[in-house]
Each structure stands twice: as C-alpha cells, then as structure tokens.
Amino acid sequence: MPFIEEILKHRSLSIVGMEKNTGKTECLNYILRRIKGSGKKIAVTSIGVDGESIDLVKSIKKPEIELYEDVIFLTSENHYKQKKITSEILDISEKKTPMGRLVTARSVNRGKIIFSGPSDTQWLSSCIRKMDAYNVDTTIVDGALSRTSHASPAITQCMILTTGAAVSTNLQQLIKKTKFQYELLKIPVAASGISEKISGNERGIYAVDNTINIIQLNISSAFFIEKHREDLFRYGSVLYFTGMVTDKVLNFLKFQNNIRDITIIVRDFTCLFITPEVLNEYKKMGGKIFVLYNTKLIAVCINPVSPDGFIIDSSRLQAELSSALKLPVYDVKNIQK
C-alpha cells in the first residue's frame, strides 16, 4: 500500500482513533505486518493502555497487538510481565508511569503485547529521541483522539486517522464528523516570521503587534479572557493561545467589534476543542485562525463495524469518505491478506 511507503519516510508516526473501536489496533497490526522484511527497524509504544483482548468499558473482544521479531517496544512493568512474547530488556526507566517503570525491550520472536507507555507527552517525545540509540528508523505511537497531544507535530512527524461506525452508525454523520477532524488538521500555518518569534513562548496568551513584537498579556489561560476584555486587544488583534481554545473562546471573540481583524494562533490542531458550528460562525463573522505547526496526515483507515455489531457497507463508506476528504481511505481488515 502506498501509505506504508510514506510511513517509512518519517521518524515517527501516531495512529489516532476518533473513538474507541475505530480499528486502531487492526491498523497497527497491518502496518507491522507490511513493514516486516522491509529492512527498517521499528519501535512501538502508546499513550494510555492499548492491546487488551477485552474492552474493559464495553466488555467486547478486541484484536491484540502482535509484534514480529526485532521490534523495539516500550511498555510499563505491569504489562511487560503479562507479555506473550520472548524479549530482551534494553532499558528500565527511573521515572514511573501509573503502571510502574517503563521497560524498553526488543522482541526475539513473534508474540503479543499490551502497551502502556510514557504517561505524558514530554516523556514520550524524549523516548522517541532515544530510539536513535537503537538504530530505530520509525517509532509508532498508538493513541486516541481523547488524548491527541501525542499526535502533535512537536511529538510525531505524521499521523494516521482511524474512524468508523463507532463514531456514528449514520453514514452522513460519520462523514461529517471525520471531515471536520480533517479540516482541523488542515488549518493553515501562520506566517513564518510570526511562527519563529512565538514558538518559544509557554503558558498564557500573547498579543502580536503590527511589527511582530510578541507581548505577554498576563492572562494565564483562555478561561479568563472575558475578565480581561479591556486589555485583550491593547496591542492589536492577533492573539496567540499557548493552551486550548474552546467554543467559549470563539463565541466570546465573534461578538467583539473588531471581529473582522481578529486572528487566533494556536500551537497545532491538538489545542482546538471546538465544534463545526461554532468554528464556522466565527469564520463567517470574519475571524481567522492559524497554527504554528501543521500535521501531515498519511492515511485514513476505517472500521465499518460498530461495537454493537451494526455494519456500514465498507465499499460505500470508503468511496463516500474518500470523496469528501479528497484522500485515499483504507479498510485494512479487508486487504490484510
């Protein structure tokens, strides 16, 4: 598949599911099978717990994660003890996850593993960098949309999005929700001069004036902008939010007198917790939004079966979603052989 070749051009990849049971594990297993024998060295880890045989929330059977020989993997002590694979331990962290220290190991044969990797994105980023010591070509991070921070361009270089009937059993609603997520991924990057000056700033809200000076507004987060409405635009109408931007922020800004001049900049799509209706209204009123870093989407993969057993026709879902996104869409379970 073309997207497998594209994955191997990058140092790191995140697999992000829009919901549970959208086929992340099937996608990961497919990638691992296709990469086997390529001569590329792969590492795999996760934010959160992935690879259980039973979904603990819905009590339904799930596909397990299967590694082949000579794959580097990172998981917690608790889940390392439960592995069904022979492996060589390469490192044990001093820092602990909620499931114990982090074990870095190399698979000696084929077998199954449960992942519970680094417990925060800073640690994850550090782990990815350390994979150079083991001559790893690409590190794959398994995750979910509920914890998208691992898919930030600051953490991984590219991503695969998985979607399906677990998102909605209504085909048009499923396409609408997936398309909106893709639209967030495509938000344009701010001008390079602004991006270079802003990128090092952490915590709070900043103004960017007409000469691209960056001014801290002493507003700790977006939750407090209404209390500081008098100071918000003192230095201009371009604002950089280091943290999350929500519907509440956009709803507040769209009613400002200078809405046609207002520009929001965020780090990347993982900072946006907004709905299509509110974003569209904000843009319709004249507001603009940019990111410092955008994410390269390698592929969209689908699971046409919902947790309750409802099945959407795979071929129709692939065709209509591909048409809406203008991207190839894959059902890896139907091509895995």
Image (cartoon, rainbow, N blue to C red):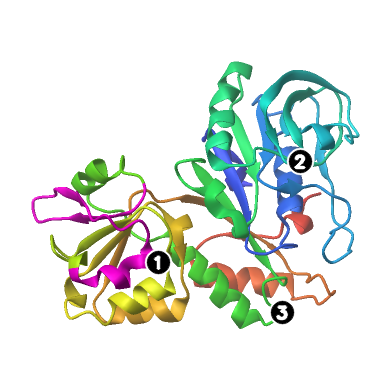
Q: Which residue is mark 1?
A: 223
Mark 2 or 3, nearer chain start: 2
Mark 2 lies on residue = 115
Please rate how many residues cluster around mark 1, counting C-alpha atoms within 10 Å: few if below 14, some from 14 to 19, many from 20: some
Q: As drawn, is 66 to the left or to the right of 320?
A: right
The spot of residue 103 in percent (x, y) is 74, 27
Label 2 and label 3: CA atoms lie apart by 29 Å
Q: Nearer the viewer, mark 3 or mark 1?
A: 1
In the drawing, does residue 265 fall left or right of residue 243? left
> Is residue 227 located in the magenta-colored stretch of the structure?
yes
Q: Answer yes or no: do the residues labelled 2 and 1 have beta carbons within 8 Å?
A: no
* Residue 266: mark in rendering: none
Q: Look at the picture and state if 247 lies above or below 85.
A: below
Q: Quadrant of residue 223?
A: bottom left
Q: Disc 3 residue type?
A: Thr
Is 206 inside the magenta-drawn segment? yes
Question: Magenta segment range?
Answer: 203-230
Circle 3 residue: 169
Coordinates of residue 54 in the picture (x, y in percent): 88, 56
Please report whichever mark, 3 or 1, sits nearer to the chain's N-terminal start. Answer: 3
Cα distance in 3D space between marks 2 and 1: 34 Å
